Amino acid sequence: MFPKYDVIVVGAGHSGCEAAVAAANMGSKVLLVTMNMQTIAQMSCNPAMGGVAKGQIVREVDALNGYSGIVTDHTMVQFRMLNRSKGPAMWSPRAQSDRMLFAAKWREMLEANSNIDFWQEMVTGIIVKGGRVRGVRTGLGLEIESEAVILTNGTFLNGIIHIGEKQFGGGRAGERAATGITEQLIELGFEAGRMKTGTPPRVDGRTLNFEAMEPQPGDERPGKFSYLDTPPLEKQLPCYITYTNPEVHEVLRSGFDKSPMFTGRIQGLGPRYCPSIEDKVERFAERERHQIFVEPEGWRTVEMYVNGFSSSLPEDVQYKALRKVPGFENVKMFRPGYAIEYDFFPPTQLKPTLETRLVKNLFFAGQINGTTGYEEAACQGLIAGINAHQAIHEREPLVLRRSEAYIGVLIDDLVNKGTKEPYRMFTSRAEYRILLRQDNADLRLTPIVHRLGMKGLDERMARVEEKRTAAERIERFFRETSVSPDQINGYLERLGSAPLSQKVKLHSVLLRPHITMEGLREVLPHVDEFLSQFREEYRQLAEINMKYEGYIKREQEMVEKMNRLEEVPLPENFDYRQLGALSAEAREKLSQVRPRTVGQASRISGVSPADISVLLVHLGR
């Protein structure tokens, strides 16, 4: 019934979808298996992509020829660039999407790829022979062969949904849990754990009083995620902000005795940085209010997402508390919030390629690795998809360094440090933020996948080369073109900047605080004439390169120092127990993680600088 596939992807969430297209675009024949073809790429939680650090990840996924950015651009209802008041390393794009259009666009793009087949059924196990994965086994008893398998099961592995004192099996509201895989993986020697996440109630927008809330419009000139020519956003829907109050908190507390979180029925650890509303009320009892974001679910629906009000309290308590929130006095609820508990596998059991150490050509990606968020899941799927293809053809794997991408930071953190709670990306996790900006992900990453042989990159590579050349031309113009005091002093004085006493290069003027390229265009016609031939993103890149040149150079020097350790390989089967000079913890951790390089070893929790020195001495360095 089935041919033998190169790669089978289990699960069609954000991670599974990116894994499927990545492997297919590398040239593999892929089977995408999902329990429900109607929920492919479902936005299970909030209808948004991007945000602080997450927006950088979406742009990196796009630069690596993933589809998340393209789909978001086609389906967004609002766009905002966050952190504009800070330096460019902190700028983070975020978009509200139309939930239904998002899933429909993803399915359309998947179905347009002739290398991807689909099958709707539950996978209950994997086929392993001689320490190598050979396919999957389904609930109907079918055995489908493949050279590699990528598990992207999300919250479905033995998932349990909690609402107050009620609990029932499920991987998402209205969908059953997946069983069988965890038990088999434990038999194979894998370590498993439990995590939990939650979602807020959805409400009827017709019953809300938006006059009582603060509107939060999108950017006046909305941007986008993809580096390709996706359609611009012509109109936008507003979001709104409101707040809880002591009355809301009092109603919530009345249900604490029935909360699965406080009564101990939930064993899994929840996300530290996205706590439930009852957790916020309990942990921050001194605060009189908490912010609530009211977000539209799409163009043609009245359903609204109550961001910041995630809860697993009884539905009647959620309802009573919501009606005490300003603007929600007459609210009608479409469905209550709930918590979901699910199995995950500590990611220290993976190689940096996301292949498991125990079973060859078996890859894990997404929430199965203990992460939270669409963006974190999507980038893992993409890397797993590329590496599954590379592995079965015995080709060079894709392992991104911490200095190359936020994706590299994320996977490096997971594989070397593991996680005891749902892992979420922040800009603070990256040491080289000024190098890993959202505006230059294409320059950093597109050439890498092009070199690996991914198909369909001609347009992207042409854009990368055009962008690089344009930025160099703009920088050269600013370094070579002079400006006289009579041309610019009026503008400088208006900004409170010291006037010029003689001709200087434009570059030195641009380096002053508050001076921008756009401002110079307004007062210097020859500058405007030159810059008008370039796209805004090219001008922005050149401006950042010039203004932050010193910081960029400093970070590049730091990278070069760290890369010296990254270039010192460690034998894969090295017996760390023979090195008595290593600490006992270092011997244990190094034997468990099996780092590829001394640089990777240096980032393993419990391995000290003294331990690294011992390794370098042993290696003759």
Image (cartoon, rainbow, N blue to C red):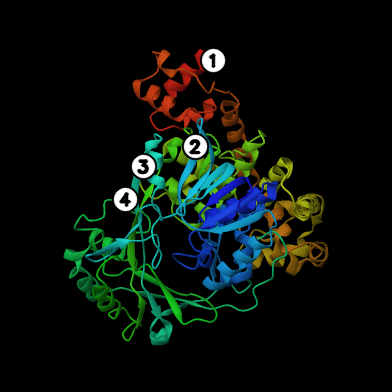
Mark 1 vs mark 2: which is more N-terminal? 2
Q: Quadrant of residue 154?
A: bottom left
Name the residue located 73 percent from the left edge and 57 percent from the top edge.
538
Residue density around tag 1, few if under 14, some if 14–19, many if 20 or more, within 10 Å: few
Q: Which residue is mark 2?
A: 128
Rendered-image quadrant of the C terminus: top right
Q: Please tell me whether mark 2 or mark 4 is closer to you in this view.
A: 2
> Going by the image, does 69 lie left or right of 472?
left
Q: Is residue 2 left or right of residue 316?
A: right
Q: Are marks 1 and 4 in contact (CB under 8 Å)?
A: no
Residue topped by disc 3: 192
Q: Residues within 10 Å of mark 2 (few under 14, many from 20)?
A: some
Q: Earlier in the sequence, mark 3 or mark 2?
A: 2
Residue under numbered circle 1: 619
Q: Residue 345: give its label.
A: none
The disc placed on residue 269 is 4
The percent position of residue 282, horizontal first and vertical second, equals 23, 61
Disc 1 from disc 2: Cα separation? 36 Å
Residue closer to the observer: 513 or 504: 513
Residue 87 visible in the displayed image: no
Q: Amino acid at mark 3?
A: Ala
Camera-side residue of 225 and 197 = 197
Could you tell me how far apart the alpha carbons at marks 1 and 3 are, in whole angstroms?
A: 35 Å
Q: Is residue 300 above or below residue 459?
A: below
Across and down, in percent, residue 594 comes to 48, 27
Q: Nearer the viewer, mark 1 or mark 3?
A: 3
